Image (cartoon, rainbow, N blue to C red):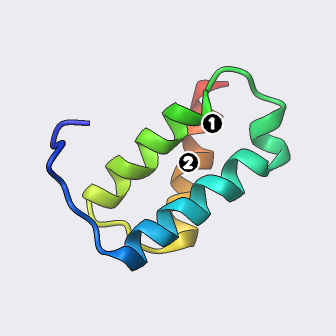
Amino acid sequence: MNNLKQQFDTSTVAVMRQALNEVVADRRFLVRKSVTPLEVAEHILEQAALGVRDLNGLKSSAFDKLGAAA
């Protein structure tokens, strides 16, 4: 993550947390060992920093990352 001083409002943090929880609890994540929960969290943070703020967008992006890592 490039900008350690990036700040998010509480609603964005809640959406990022929900996205992370849903991705790591999903079967698609559990069957793949190539990506760690930390890597998923970093990816979600990067996407939020780029302006993706909706739950489905964050989850979709994370699952795309899982697919690419397979």
Instruction: Kindly identify the residue that appears in the image at 73 percent across and 22 percent down.
Output: 33
Residue 59: image x %, image y %? 58, 59
Could you tell whether 41 is left or right of 21 in the image?
left
* Element at label 1: helix
Assign a secondary structure to mark 2: helix
Q: Which residue is mark 2?
A: 62
For the residues marked 2 and 1, what is the alpha-carbon distance in whole angstroms?
Answer: 6 Å
Identify whether 30 is placed above or below 11. Answer: above
Q: Quadrant of the N terminus?
A: top left
Residue 31 coordinates in the image, percent (x, y): 84, 31
> Circle 1: is it few (<14), some (14-19), or many (20+) Cα within 10 Å?
some
The mark found on residue 2 in the picture is none
Q: Relative to residue 40, is residue 49 drawn left or right?
A: left
Residue drawn at the location 33% of the way across and 47% of the way down? 46
Please report the residue visible at 70 percent of the width from the left and 45 percent of the height from the top: 24
Closer to us: 46 or 69: 46
Q: Nearer the viewer, residue 32 or 6?
A: 6
Query: Looking at the image, is 69 positioned above or below residue 30?
Result: above
Q: Residue at x 47, y 74 (%)?
A: 54
Residue 66: mark = 1
Count of numbered marks: 2
* Screen quadrant of the C terminus: top right
Confirm or deny contact between disc 2 and disc 1 (CB under 8 A): yes
14 shown above or below 2: below
Callout 2, which amino acid?
Ala
